[in-house]
Image (spheres, rainbow, N blue to C red):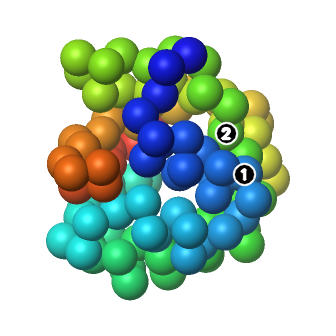
């Protein structure tokens, strides 16, 4: 699968539970929408993923990527009910970084 470098980096950071590396995949003004909440900027994104890593210990396995729609389908497994599940990661990329990410089930 041919993924943009920043999505490869994001996946690796997630699977290593590295919240700093995860946040570094985003622009300073990036926005993440997940579980009905909005997280703005790298600091909030790092805090959000750090809490999620502690709580869920989720790892992701990319299944399919649409370059034209910038959507990644990934199997996510971890310490949560219904694991594993397939989630859709809707990206907006700019200058090699993530500008926005919306995660849907």
Residue under numbered circle 2: 60
Q: Outermost residue, right direction?
A: 79
Q: Quadrant of residue 82?
A: top right
In the figure, 45 relative to 33: above or below?
below
Residue 24 visible in the shown view: yes
Judge by depth and name the residue closer to the eye, 74 or 4.
4
Q: Position of residue 65 (x, y in %)?
A: 44, 19
- In the image: residue 38, left or right of residue 47: left
Mark 2: secondary structure: strand
- In the image: residue 79, left or right of residue 27: right
Judge by depth and name the residue closer to the eye, 89 or 22.
22
Badge 1: how crowded within 10 Å, few (<14), some, or many (20+)? some
Residue 38 visible in the shown view: no
Q: Quadrant of residue 81?
A: top right
Could you tell me which quadrant the N terminus lies in? top right
Residue at 61% x, 66% y is 52
Tag 2–tag 1 contact (CB < 8 Å):
yes
In the figure, 1 relative to 80: above or below?
above
Residue under numbered circle 1: 15
Residue at 32% x, 35% y is 90
In this figure, what is the number of numbered marks? Answer: 2
Residue at 34% x, 62% y is 26
């Amino acid at each position: 699968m041919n993924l943009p470098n920043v999505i490869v980096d994001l996946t690796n950071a997630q699977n290593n539970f590295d919240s700093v590396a995860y946040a570094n995949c985003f622009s300073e003004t990036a926005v993440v929408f997940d579980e009905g909440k909005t997280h703005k900027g790298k600091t909030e994104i790092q805090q959000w993923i750090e809490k999620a890593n502690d709580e869920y210990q989720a790892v992701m396995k990319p299944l399919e990527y649409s370059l034209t729609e910038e959507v990644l389908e990934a199997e996510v497994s971890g310490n949560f009910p219904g694991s594993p599940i397939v989630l859709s990661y809707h990206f907006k990329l700019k200058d090699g970084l993530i500008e926005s990410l919306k995660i849907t089930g």
